[in-house]
Every structure is written in structure tokens, then in C-alpha cells.
Image (cartoon, grey):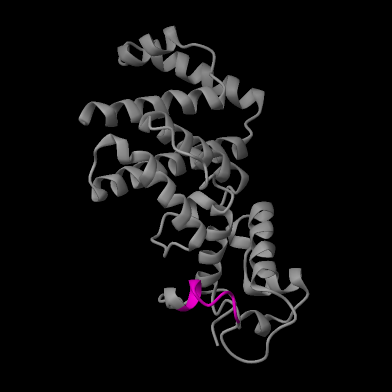
């Protein structure tokens, strides 16, 4: 039986995982559903982070014995796959594409960012390769359709999808880290004094020029939009 705190490297066969309709893999049918287990795991990760998600904690949350969970998720790796696909169901897979691939791609990125901010553990979870489940496949289908007017072949459209997803995940991970740092006004003032001294030493003229022209920090939405525009405009220039 898998260890409570570790997952097997191989996980479950994708056909068994995604095409089994959530049936338990062995033993008696537990008195709860796979959907309930995954929902509890997502709630736990949202509240306390991915490290808090153990089979024992999830079992306690749904009021079950740990061994019962293994009928639905034999290891934490499998549970994580199920969690990722569950939250992918919040993405707008059924939205009509407009024919303007740039606008549609930006809408995709904004929806991904909103999803990752709701679930701050998601960027880290996506860092390793996963087998796409039905919700992820539906969203992927939407993105590939949105990119069709760009005239890219299938492989290139997949690359663009991966590139945008990686950009959003990295950006959100930085946003979350900055928010959790919660520096005090005294700490921020100390950093400002330090940078002012560095800029005045004559050895960092470029930094001094940047600091002299720095504006008030933009709100997070505006910053994301500016970065996203640069990314998509850069992709457009390559076509």
C-alpha cells in the first residue's frame, strides 16, 4: 500500500484514471465519491498549500479512513492529477472563439491567471508533466481552436499554448510570493534607502536612471496586461 506522505513515480494508467468514471479500483465501494474526495483535497490546498494535502488529512476532511481513499486515488500523485483537472473545469472551455486569435489568446491567459489566483498551489502543480483529464482536454480544445486563425500547424499551436501557460504560471507564482511576503512599511523604507545609496555611488548609472524615473507601482491587473501584451505581440511578430 502506498505511503501516506509520498506518491509512486508511475501513478495510475491514464485510461484507468480518466475513463473509469470514478469507480474505485479495488475492494468494497466506499460511502463517498471521488468527486467529494477531490473537492476536499482542493479545499485543503487552497487553504493551507499543497504540502498540507496528504491522504490522511483528506481522509479526515471527508470523514473516512485513510485506507478507503486508496480505492479512488492510490497515491498522492494520482490525487494531484484529479485536483488539477477539477480546477480546470472552472476555465471557460465552452466559450465561442471570435476569430481574432490575439484577443482570444489574451482572454485565455486572463482566465488562467484568475484560476491560478483562486488556487495558488496550481502553478507549482503544473510544473511537472501531467496526463490531461477531460476538463483539461476541453480547455485545450478551446485554445487550439482559438489559435487556428493564426495559421500555425498543430505542433506550433501546442507550443504557444504551453508558452502562454508557463508565462501565466510564473507570473502568478511571483504575485503570490510577493503577496505572502507582506513587508512592513519600515522594511520597504529600508530597502528604498539602500537602493538610493547604491544609485548614488556612481557605479550603477543605469540603475540610477531607472530609479530616478520610476513611477508608482501599477496595480497587478495592469502589470499582467502589459506583460501579456508584450508576449502576444511578440508571437504575432514571428508569424
Look at the image and tell me whether residue 21 can be seen.
yes
Residue 105 lies, in percent from the top left, at 41, 35
Image quadrant in which the N terminus is located:
bottom right
Does the magenta portion include 164?
Answer: no
Left or right: 53 in relation to 203: right
Is 170 situated above or below 5? above
How many numbered discs sit on the rendered protein? 0
Left or right: 198 in relation to 89: left
Residue 132 lies, in percent from the top left, at 43, 62
Residue 197 lies, in percent from the top left, at 45, 14
Residue at image position (63%, 66%) is 38
Residue 223 lies, in percent from the top left, at 49, 24
Left or right: 107 in relation to 40: left
Residue at image position (51%, 71%) is 78
User: Is the stretch drawn in magenta largely helix, strand or loop?
Assistant: loop
Q: Nearer the viewer, residue 138 or 174?
A: 138
Residue at image position (67%, 74%) is 56
Magenta stretch bounds: 16-23
Residue at image position (46%, 44%) is 169
Look at the image and tell me whether residue 166 can be seen.
no
Amino acid at each position: 500500500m502506498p505511503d501516506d506522505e509520498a506518491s509512486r513515480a508511475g501513478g495510475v494508467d491514464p485510461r484507468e484514471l480518466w475513463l473509469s468514471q470514478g469507480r474505485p479500483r479495488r475492494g468494497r465501494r466506499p460511502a463517498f465519491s471521488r468527486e467529494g474526495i477531490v473537492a476536499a483535497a482542493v479545499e485543503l490546498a487552497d487553504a493551507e498549500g499543497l504540502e498540507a494535502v496528504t491522504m490522511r488529512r483528506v481522509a479526515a476532511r471527508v470523514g473516512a479512513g485513510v485506507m478507503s481513499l486508496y480505492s479512488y486515488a492510490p497515491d498522492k500523485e494520482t490525487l494531484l492529477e484529479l485536483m488539477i483537472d477539477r480546477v480546470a473545469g472552472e476555465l471557460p472551455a465552452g466559450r465561442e472563439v471570435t476569430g481574432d486569435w490575439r484577443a482570444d489568446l489574451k482572454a485565455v491567459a486572463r482566465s488562467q491567471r484568475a484560476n491560478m489566483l483562486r488556487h495558488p498551489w496550481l502553478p507549482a502543480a503544473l510544473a511537472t508533466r501531467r496526463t490531461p483529464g477531460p476538463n483539461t482536454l476541453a480547455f485545450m480544445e478551446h485554445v487550439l481552436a482559438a489559435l487556428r486563425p493564426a495559421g500555425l500547424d498543430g505542433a506550433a499551436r501546442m507550443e504557444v499554448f504551453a508558452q502562454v501557460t508557463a508565462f501565466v504560471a510564473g507570473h502568478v507564482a511571483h504575485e503570490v510570493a510577493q503577496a505572502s511576503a507582506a513587508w512592513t512599511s519600515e522594511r520597504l523604507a529600508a530597502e528604498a534607502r539602500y537602493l538610493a545609496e547604491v544609485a548614488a555611488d556612481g557605479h550603477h548609472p543605469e540603475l540610477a536612471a531607472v530609479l530616478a524615473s520610476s513611477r508608482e507601482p501599477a496595480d497587478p491587473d495592469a502589470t499582467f496586461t502589459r506583460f501579456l501584451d508584450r508576449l502576444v505581440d511578440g508571437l504575432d511578430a514571428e508569424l
